[in-house]
Amino acid sequence: MKKNLLKCTFCLLLAITLIVLPSFANDQTMKNQMAMKSQYSTTRFTNIVLFQNSFEISDHGKASVSAYLTARNVDKVKVSTKLQQYKNGSWQTIKSWTQTSSGTYAGLSGTYYVTKGYQYRIVSTGKVYLNQSLVEQTTYTSNPIFY
């Protein structure tokens, strides 16, 4: 009799555990997904596949900049990057690069020596065209680097 009571109790606890845990996990997953949606913004593109940027300043003041854009279902791609310096309370463009290519890919890279004692950043824009009409664009602004 005690063995049957022990088996029934065990089965009952197992059944309760199997019912309660999945609903808790689903509730927690839902809360995590909602929290992530409020913290992160995801941009979905139709034609732009990848827009990759890089910016660094060496110990000697050499700013290295690159921007690459890959797209699909377009016939022209344009990438432009501005190197900006924070001076007198505003961001001022001190050097810019532009690359336009027919097809689905454009990339640029460049270097420029900057002056010590300022913050620098890049602002890059990627545009894609189909039949001479702009169909999509995006902009990237880097975090400032103090040199």
Image (spheres, rainbow, N blue to C red):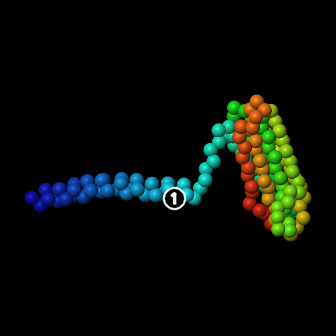
Seen in the picture, residue 113 relative to 98 is either above or below; the reply is below
Q: Position of residue 61 (x, y in %)?
A: 87, 62
| Element at label 1 | helix
Q: Position of residue 69 (x, y in %)?
A: 74, 42
| Amino acid residing under circle 1 | Ala
Give the residue drawn at x 72%, y 43%.
137
Query: Farthest residue toward the front?
Result: 133
Position of residue 18 relative to residue 132, above or below, is below
Write the residue at 77% across / 38% down. Answer: 77
The residue at 76%/44% (across/down) is: 126
Taking 56 as reference, is 127 above or below it? above
Nearest to the observer: residue 53 or residue 15? 53
Q: Nearer the viewer, residue 40 or 13?
A: 40
Residue 144 or residue 61, whichever sits in front: 144
Q: Quadrant of residue 51?
A: top right
Picture quarter with the C terminus: bottom right
Q: Residue at x 76, y 30 (%)?
A: 131
Viewer-side residue, 95 vs 134: 134
Is any atom of residue 118 visible in this view? no
Does any portion of residue 135 appear in the rendered image? yes
Q: Which residue is mark 1?
A: 35
Determine whether, in the image, residue 43 is placed left or right of residue 85: left
Rendered location of residue 45, percent (x, y): 65, 42
- Measuring from the top left, give residue 8's x and y in whole percent: 17, 56
Q: Quadrant of the N terminus?
A: bottom left
Point out the residue furthest to the top here. 131
Going by the image, does 119 lie left or right of 73? right
Residue 13 lies in what quarter of the image? bottom left
